[in-house]
Image (cartoon, grey):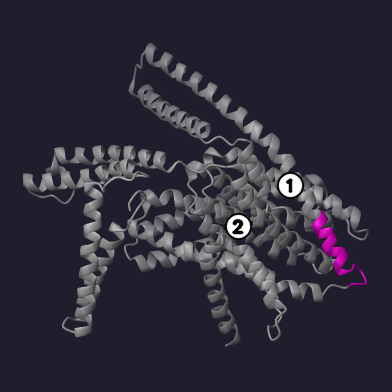
Amino acid sequence: MELALFAVVGVAVIVTVAAFSKRLGIAAPLILVVLGLALSYTPGVPEFSVPHQWILMGVLPPLLYAAAVNVPVVDFRRNIGAISSLSVFLVLFSAFATGLLLYLLLPDLNFAAAVALGAVVSPPDAVAATSIGKKLGLPPRLVTVLEGEGLVNDATALVLLRSAVAASAGGLSSIWAGIGDFGFAVVVAVLVGLLVGAATVYVRSKLQDPVLDTAISFVVPFIAFIPAEEAGASGVLAVVVAGLYTGHRSASALTAQARINDSINWRTIQFLLENGVFLLMGLELRHLVENVDASLLPVLDAVLIGLATTVLLILLRFAWVTPLIYLLRLKVRHQDRRTKRFRLGLDRIKANGLSDERQRRRHRRAELLYLRRRADVEQLSREGLGWRGGMVISWSGMRGVVTLAAAQSLPEQTPYHEQLVLIAFTVAVATLLLQGGTLPWLIRLLGVRGRDVASDQRELAKLLDELSGAGLSVLERPEHCPGVRQEVDPDVVERVRQSTFLRSELAWERVRALGENEDPTPQLQYRALRRAVVEAERDQLLLARREGRFASRTLSEAQRLLDLEESRLRPRLGER
């Protein structure tokens, strides 16, 4: 009963903080950490100490899966260089560097155990950074890099933590054994993630019941996590791969209803879990401080070591990101030159002639590859990461969920165990309050400009023109359309044609109306009037329900139809 009460209060606190944080302009995770810390010292509030297994096995898989299914694979692939550099190599570099610092400051700690704690504090949590960035309108590429880093760096840190703990206990014979263990964990995790993603997407594509489909989607993270962990691989990485695969394949394999359900369900799960962990982080600090054995290392000394580690991590991130931005710009230029050479090669092959069907198929595939490469170069050039973007990435090093759980997973026999956990929590709280609290100010100071709304709307209108063209081509021979068994009335064809035009026409009207003080365009007026009509219809539906003149099932069906219409007509970008 008490646990249920705390859960209800926790959700109420999270929702309230999230609602007010938008008005205050402060990221909700920052407020929740401070609020949790204040609540922990409130009389009558019990001590909180959640087993780390609950976080690592019960919270982290669905949290990472929820983030992964919403990351576009195309953007992830385009930025794989930046993402892998930050999420793999920077984590390894930071872990060994901070491990060396801790090894020098704590005389009874061996180097492997120090690296283990370095692995705990190395992976940033992108939740606070991306929530601030999206609110302030950061460029999409910056957000993608931070989200991608947050997905993969957890796996890197946890695999390194496992290897370092094994080395500390004498379970690894050499450094090569550690490298082999790391490689095995990554390769097997990727294979398990792909297998689980492909299998679950296939099963869900055969289901027509949205309830069954949703039920399967809820267990996908655990289906990927558990076998990967049992095989000695990274369950976290398997979850990320399964989420990326599912998100990418959902457009072609799953129904529209399944995609809508997934979007709403996983956004809700992600919101509750990630904010709940930050609240828990604040609540647990009192318990950590009170359990420190001051005879080994006083609380103040542990906190000071944590602050020193925080400074080192910030400096390491700046030192890593600065040359990375320069190298990424060089890479785009190199990709541009390679793409141009590839185009010349295709032209030469075509000029020499394509003798058979096999060569023509290969040439078509090569043309498609060229178009993709050309689009990659144009996109990366248009959204280049300059020094301002590098500053934002460098300052977005807040720690969170993994640091909280992994710190408590350190073996109990590790020297300075309680102090090491406190050091990790100090790093997490300090980075959240310092970097998270000042990141909005830094973004405004640097004048980092976000996406061009008008340009995005214009690009959407062009895409809808292409879609409409492809759709209208079907009407040239309507009798061949699926489900049509007889000659089609020309009036019906014309009605479909006009309704297809409306979507594209509305998009171009939004482009013209965006940011301008002009009279509403005809299509925008139409949508506004339709919304008013639907609102009047809903009032009449509520009156009919109060009078009880219709069966409840009839009323429910009418409400469903009105809900669909209202969601379709809701105000969008460029509408007033």
Mark 1 or 2: in front is: 2
Per the rendered image, the range of residues in magenta is 294-308
For the residues bearing labels 1 and 2, Cβ distance under 8 angstroms? no
Q: Is residue 98 magenta?
A: no
Residue at the image position 31 percent from the left and 62 percent from the top: 208
Residue 391 shown left or right of residue 16 in the figure: right
Helix, strand or loop at mark 2: helix
Between the residue at mark 1 and the residue at mark 2, the CA separation in whole angstroms equals 22 Å
Q: Position of residue 143 (x, y in %)?
A: 55, 47
Residue 263 at x, y = what percent? 43, 59
Q: Is residue 138 above or below residue 60?
A: above
The residue at which mark 1 appears reads as 92
Q: Is residue 136 visible?
A: yes
When the figure is inspected, residue 225 is found, relative to residue 287, above or below; the finding is above
The amino acid at mark 2 is Ala
Residue 114 in the image, given as x and y percentages of width and height: 83, 56
Magenta span: helix, strand or loop, mainly? helix
* Residue holding disc 2: 128
Does the magenta-highlighted stretch encompass residue 298?
yes
**Based on the displayed image, in which of its 4 quarters is residue 203 positioned?**
bottom left
Question: Could you tell me which quadrant the N terminus lies in?
Answer: bottom right
Query: Considering only order in the chain, which callout, 2 or 1, is on the residue closer to the N terminus?
Result: 1
Helix, strand or loop at label 1? It is: helix
